Image (spheres, rainbow, N blue to C red):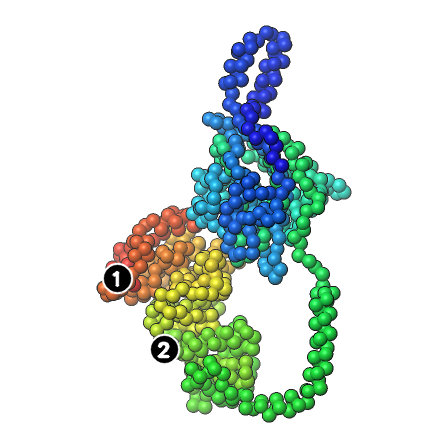
Amino acid sequence: MVHPIPCFHTFSRPVLLHAKTMIRHKQKHTCPLPLLLLIFLFFNYTCAIDFVFNGFNSSEVLLFGNATIDSRILTLTHDQTFSIGRALYREKIPTKRPNSSFVYPFSTSFIFAMAPYENTLPGHGLVFIFTPVTGIQGTSSAQHLGLFNLTNNGNSSNHVLGVEFDVFMNQEFDDLNANHVGIDINSLKSFVSNDSGYWQDDGDKSFKELTLNNGENYQVWIDYEDSWMNVTIAPVGRKRPSRPLLNVSLNLSQVFEDEMFVGFTSATGQLVQSHKILGWSFSNDNISLSDELITTGLPSFVLPKDSIFKSKGFVAGFTVGVFLVICVLVLLAQILIQWKRRRERKRQEMEDWELEYWPHRMVYEEIEAATKGFSEENVIGVGGNGKVYKGVLRGGVEIAVKRISHENDGVREFLAEVSSLGRLKQRNLVGLRGWGKKDVGSFFLVYDYMENGSLDKRVFDCDERKMLSYEDRIRIIKDVAFAVLYLHEGWEAKVVHRDIKASNVLLDKDMNGKLGDFGLARMHGHGQVASTTKLVGTVGYLAPEMFKTGRASTQTDVYMYGILILEVLCGRRPLEEGKVPLVEWVWQLMVQGQIVFVLDERLRAKGEFSEQEVERLMHLGLLCAYPEPKARPTMRQVVNVLEGKKEVDDSEIENMDSYLLQQLKSRDILSEYSQYFSYASHPTFKDIRNSSSISLTWSESVIDGR
C-alpha cells in the first residue's frame, strides 16, 4: 500500500523542533504572527514520502534489465548468466535540503530471498541503492552487481549509496568472505562490512550467522538519521534485533543529491541465482512503518531436501531395474561368449576419427616394450589425465609416452592433441611421433624425448649447476614466441593453445625451448571467434576477461606469454603464498625505478646481464599481460620486437587492427594500467622502441606489425 500523503509540504525535524521552541517562547513573550510566518517561509520544505508494498505491480516501480514482476513478487534476476536486474521507486524522492548539506533521515525495510537453482552454483548478490539516475547503463554483471563497472567503480561523481548483500568473495574489492553485508559509497569496496547475521536478544546474546543464498526469506531494516546509519537483518517473522549488524557514522552530504531514486539492483555471472523482493516499506518520517509489512504466509524458495530414495520415480525405476537385471543374467552366458570372440577383433577396429590420423598410429606392443610395460621406474611426469613415461625404441631412439586416462576429459585431451599437434610442424613445437590405443578408450601419445625436461624445473626446482643462464632464458623466451606465432598465424587454421606456462615448455639437449601439451588447444578458422565458454587453464596465467566470458582467444594466449616472460626472468611463479602477485610486483618496482631488482637474484649475483635489456623485456611482459585485451600486442608484434626487425611488410601494415594500433601508440593506456595497480605509469610499445639500443634491436616494426 502507498500512503495517501505522497507530497505535502512539511519541515525537517530540526525545523519542526525550532518551530515548537518558538511557539513555547511565544507563551512568555508576545511574538507577532507575521514574523512567525516569515520565519517558517525562510526554511526549505520537502515532500514526505511514505509507502508500503506487500507485493508489487508494474505501476509502482520502474523495471530495468531482467527485472520482472510475477505473482506480485519482484524478481530481479532469473536463471540467465551474466545478467542485470534493477527496480526503482517510480519517482525521485527528496533526500537533501536544497542548497544545504543537511541530509533528510529515512527508514526502510524490505523482505528478500536469494533463490538457488538445482545443480547450479549460486551468485552474486543484490544491493539496496540510492542513485541519481535510472537504467543500467554504466553497470556490469557478475561481481559488479549491476551497480558499477570496471571504469566508473570508485568515482565520486557516481553519487550512489548502496547496502550490499554479497554472496561471492571478490579479492579486488577486499570482500570479507562469500556471505557478507556491506555499505558501499560510490564503490564496491565497502565503507564498512560484516559477516551476514544478527545478534540474538535472548540467551547469551550471541551472534547468529545467516546464509544469504539458501532460499530463506530475510527481513532487513536500514535507518539513517543525524549522520548515523544502522543496518539490521534477521529471518523474516523474527522481531527486529535490538543490536544492529552495522552501526556507523556516515556523512552523506557529498553523496546525496537533492533528489534520488531508491530501489534495488542485482546481477549474476557464471554463477546464477534468482534475487527476489517480497515486500518493501520506506519513509522519511515514520520509523515504525516497517511494522505494516506482511511477514507470514510468504512463499519459500528453499530447495527440497527429500531423499531421492523416497520418490515415486525411484521406486518405479528400481522395480523396472530389478526386472532388467534378471533378464540380463539369463542372457549373460551368450553375451559373454560373443564378447570374447569379438574382443580381439575390436582391439584393431578403427573409429571414424582414426581415418584422418592413421599414418601416425603406432603398435601398442612396441610402446609397451619401449616403456618396460609402463613401469613406474620410467615415469617422468604426471599430468591431469595420465602419466608420462620415458621409453626407448628398438633403434635406440628415446621417446616420451603420455598414457591418457579413460575419462571423458582424457579422451577430449587425446583428440585435441592428435588433431592439432599431429598436423603442426614447427621447430619450436614438441614433435608428436605418433599415437595408438590398446582397447577402445585406452590411448597413448608418443613424443620426441626432451633431455633437459621442462622449463619450470630449470628455473624453480634445480641447483645452481643446472640453473638456466640469462642468455638461455632469453633464447627460450624467443623460441616460445615463434611457436605461439606459428599457432596463431602460420597454419591453415588458427590454433589457440589456452595453457601457455613454464611447465608446458620443454627443453631439448641443446636447450632449445619447445611448446607442448596441447590438451586444451582448440582450432578455429582465421577471423572466427571461439564458441566455447568453459573456463579452462591454469590459475595465475588466465587473462582477466576469461573470468567474465570463459572464452579463450589469441589475446589470452598473448597474456599467458607475458606472464611467462616475467616468471622466467624474475624466477618467481605468478602466484606465491604470502607475496604480491608477480605482475603487480614487477609493476611496483618498475615505477620505483628499481626494475633491475625484478631479475632473478641468482642471475643478478652473476652480473651477466644488461639492465636496459631487462627493463625492456619486463616492459614487453607487462604489455602482453595488460588487463584490456585490445591493448595487447599481437604475437607478430612481439616477435618483431624480439627479432629487432628493421622493416615491416606493407601487407602487415594493412592488416593491422587500427584500434589496437592507436592504443599501442597512445599513452592513454598508462593511466588505465596505473588505476589497475594504483601506481604511476606503464611503458607503451613506442616507449620500448624509442629507448637506447641493447642486444635486442628495437625498431619501428614494433608498432607497424600485423
Query: Dot 1: few (<14), some (14–19), or many (≥20) neighbours within 10 Å?
Result: some
The residue drawn where x is 38% and y is 53% is 590
Is any part of residue 561 visible from this angle?
A: no
User: x%, y% of residue 172?
Assistant: 50, 51
| Residue type (three-letter) at the residue carrying disc 2 | Lys
Return the residue nearer the eye: 38 or 599.
38
- Which residue position holds label 1? 653
The residue drawn where x is 47% and y is 46% is 136
- Which residue position holds label 2? 425
* Above or below for 361 versus 230: below
The residue drawn where x is 65% and y is 43% is 219
The quadrant of the rendering that contains the N terminus is top right
Quadrant for residue 704, please give it: bottom left
Return the residue nearer the eye: 677 or 309.
309
* Above or below for 529 versus 627: below
Return the residue nearer the eye: 95 or 600.
95
Say which element carries label 2: loop
